Amino acid sequence: MKKFENKVWLSSPTMHGDELKYVTEAYETNWMSTVGKNINEVERMISEKVGCKYAVALSTGTAALHLAMKLANIKQGDYVFCSDMTFAATVNPVTYEGGIPVFIDTEYDTWNMDPIALEKAFEIYPEVKVVVVAHLYGTPGKIDEIKAICDKHGAIIIEDAAESLGATYKGKETGTFGAFNVISFNGNKIITGSSGGMLLTDDLEAANKVRKWSTQSRENATWYQHEEVGYNYRMSNVIAGVVRGQIPYLEEHIQQKKAIYERYKEGFKDLPVTMNPYDEDNSEPNFWLSCMIIDEEAMCQQVRGETDALYISESGKSCPTEILDAIASINAEGRPIWKPMHMQPIYRMNPFITRDGNGRARTNAYIDGQALDVGMDIFNRGLCLPSDNKMTKEEQDIIIEIIRECFK
Ligand SMILES: *Cc1c(COP(=O)(O)O)cnc(C)c1O
């Protein structure tokens, strides 16, 4: 098949013009630092859009997660329950503070934290006070169930809504369900500042702490007076200019991403695959990335080592490795599912809790054809499809066609 002349990306920045206007305004008025109108506006617009009282603009989503861990008062040796199938940035900040991530397995309905496994985890570690929950690929997780379990055990939620800005659950935006919530404006997110992040909360005292910590924890004094450790985590007014220009286009991006998801769904309807699922009665994702998972019976043999993969091509069957190769061969970009944290060498010794009450990474994900944990199973059978909102319908048709070929 013919290669695309211009690469079709997984998800790349989409600019509209206003970004440059606000960046230029910062330049011309010389507000080129971490103070200025763009920052104030971005904080105001996001807290209004998401429906939280306070928003603090920071350098990255990871920085926001780090300060959320500090707000949650995580101390050396504390166990913290975390989503397992997610980007490492969800859990690394727990480690920065000396906490020990305990990974909670994934459920099949939304590909997020499994409330049943979470309940099991509280049986094993009743002392845990913090649960870090991500909404994968822009799909809200089982928020009501997770919240009820956390309330019952007196734990707070830190919501990692880095991928799900604009997604709603029962009409309420993600980024409002935790005590402390995080969004990201990293370059491939649904809207971007090229980088950037935010901490969202309804707690004024918490918001003030984050403001102070993120600007080196200066006390109110004539000189640089310090009573606690500080960080250089504030968002730049230049970056905020880009974000400010993007916010009005969030809904448009979501509509484009949704159309991409629907076209894939239609294009694959007679293949032995399903799209990344969501709770159609209660949630509206932002459709940041379209993903698919291959039916177990339609998987050809695929073996993954720590850094590479092999498969045996088989008629009527396929696997993520074969499909990702096919996508790459026409100059488009797909990606494997986030490799679960319990399978990562750095977190291999951390506790990992499945529905059955316990679990561990195993080199072989299947015994008698049965997956041993959900995260590993979705990682083995799933993949992320090119989901760039500048991809044309014609380009997407070609991608659909080449994936269909894999199953012939
Ligand atoms: C992107 C992302 C982050 C981190 O955001 P940055 O702004 O890149 O630091 C955190 N969690 C998840 C789930 C993400 O996808």
Image (tube, rainbow, N blue to C red):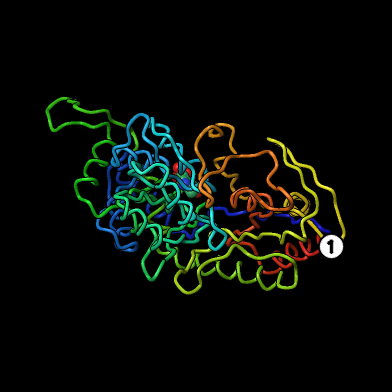
Q: Residue 332, relative to residue 316: is it above or below?
A: above
Q: Residue at x 44, y 64 (%)?
A: 167
> Local crowd at mark 1 within 10 Å, few (<14), some, or many (≥20)?
some
Q: Residue at x 79, y 43 (%)?
A: 310
- The residue tagged 1 is 316
Q: Quadrant of the N terminus?
A: bottom right
Quarter of the image for residue 396 reads: bottom right
Is residue 319 shown to the viewer in this render? yes
Could you say which is closer to the camera, residue 5 or residue 363? 363
Residue 174 shown left or right of residue 287 in the figure: left
The spot of residue 263 in percent (x, y) is: 65, 71
Q: Residue at x 78, y 61 (%)?
A: 402
Residue 26 shown left or right of residue 277 in the figure: left
Q: Quadrant of the C terminus?
A: bottom right
For numbered disc 1, what is the local secondary structure? loop
The spot of residue 104 in percent (x, y) is: 49, 47
Q: How many marks?
A: 1
Quarter of the image for residue 365 reads: top right
Quarter of the image for residue 363 reads: top right
